[in-house]
Image (cartoon, coloured by chain):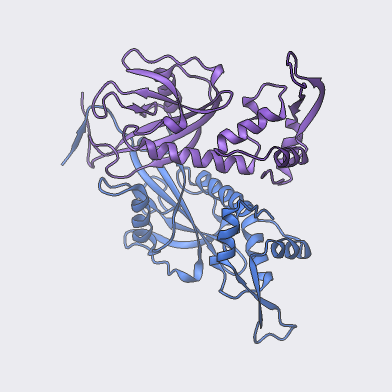
Chain colours: A purple, B blue
Amino acid sequence: MTYRYDHPRPALTVDCVVFGLDEGDLKLLLVQRSQEPFRHRWALPGGLVGMEESAERAARRELEEETGVRDVYLEQLYTFSAVDRDPRERTISIAYYALVKMTDHVVRAATDAGGAAWFSVTDAQDLAFDHDLIVHTACERLRGKLRYQPIGFELLPEKFKLSQLQRLYEVVLGTPLDKRNFRKKILAMDLLRPLDEVEQGVAHRAARLYRFDSRRYQELRRRGFNFEL
Amino acid sequence: MTYRYDHPRPALTVDCVVFGLDEGDLKLLLVQRSQEPFRHRWALPGGLVGMEESAERAARRELEEETGVRDVYLEQLYTFSAVDRDPRERTISIAYYALVKMTDHVVRAATDAGGAAWFSVTDAQDLAFDHDLIVHTACERLRGKLRYQPIGFELLPEKFKLSQLQRLYEVVLGTPLDKRNFRKKILAMDLLRPLDEVEQGVAHRAARLYRFDSRRYQELRRRGFNFEL
């Protein structure tokens, strides 16, 4: 079966940048290509957009098919349309990104794929196509977002230590933060509720636990509060 | 001539949301459709992406062809991919937006178009396709941007009154601002250089003129300064 059009049409694909957070590192979910071009190279999960699905649905479908990862909130990142980005033919790709807790997702490669795995973002280089550029764009977006809103609380346990939250910020921003300054600023936002609990089973002095106050967060957002650290 | 593919392909278009600022209003550049569907309805300038051009270049080309407006900085807004957004066939559109000074651009409709004109954003309703949604998305983006960075200075004369800047903010945000509070906050950002000049040729008490300090702005951006009003 072939499909005919009066004008030539680019192929339309989606690509998914899924960031995973583990204890101390920011990871990226990649699949290994089993076919040319870029055979054996690592790439972002993705594929063609079907005629009966939105681009976002296509992204969720491809992500699950190629990596087993499902039920993540994908946000549209950017559409990449450079004329030469795919050596086979003109291809335009709508990229999506998500930030997930790695331990919540079991990665399982598709049967026809070389593999699927988490890579440290700093090691995720020389990817297929223009995927280095897509990853770079996603990293920038993630950092920009963290500056303007307290993201990532959903990646922490319900009760967490301030040092865990600081580590999350450091991992996303890719830079160490001053402990005293971080605590002062984050507590001044009045988004954290200190609990009458400390961490359990530690030899050293037990740290206080906190909880994220999402109602307070919604209220501050409505009032146009600035969450910048 | 026809083009054949093994899989069906969506049509790929671009749409341009061009906001124009005049003295006291935020306008939107629209073209009137001369053909079905949505014949005689107003729509965003746009059209098919060619095989030898990036989406951004297609947007610039379509904008100029349909409205005569050129040399504007288009920023990618969002890609709209709902399955039923075009009644003719599956069409995915990459939307761009820009904010320009209306008086800098002469609008001239293409010979085959019904017309091209500026509309007050509040009047720009019942547009063709899903263009109401695209415009809404662009308005939200513009407001979000204004909260985090001092945009729009390029839309003012080189030397301007604080009241002109306030009006720009009010028009984009769609809400009146308290004069004293606005002045206090905007001056505290230390981005404006007061000049030893006042406006000329006015009967009432002449207002002081200011200039935007773009070097200072770049420096503050590097340091992660928060420009929120």
Can residue B82 be spotted in the picture?
Answer: no
Residue found 66% across the figure and 33% down from its top = A166
- Determine the residue located farthest toward the right in the rendered image: A196
Q: Is residue B135 above or below residue A104?
A: below
- Nearest the viewer among B210 and A175 is A175
Image quarter of residue A208: top right
The answer to whether one can see residue B105 in this image is: yes
Q: Quadrant of the N terminus of chain B?
A: top left
Front one among A142 and A49: A142
Q: Position of residue B192 (x, y in %)?
A: 64, 68
- Residue depicted at x 29% and y 49%: B53
What x and y, as percent, mark residue B11?
A: 33, 39
Q: Position of residue A195 (x, y in %)?
A: 81, 24
Q: Residue furthest front?
A: A204
Q: Is residue A95 left or right of residue B120?
A: left
In depth, the one of A105 and A50 nearer the eye is A105
**Compared with residue A143, is residue B213 higher up or lower down, i.e. above or below?**
below
Q: Residue at x 56, y 54 (%)?
A: B222
For residue A53, what is the image quadrant? top left
Q: Residue furthest left?
A: B1
Q: State which quarter of the image contains the C terminus of chain B.
A: bottom right
**Residue A9 place in picture, x, y as percent:** 27, 39
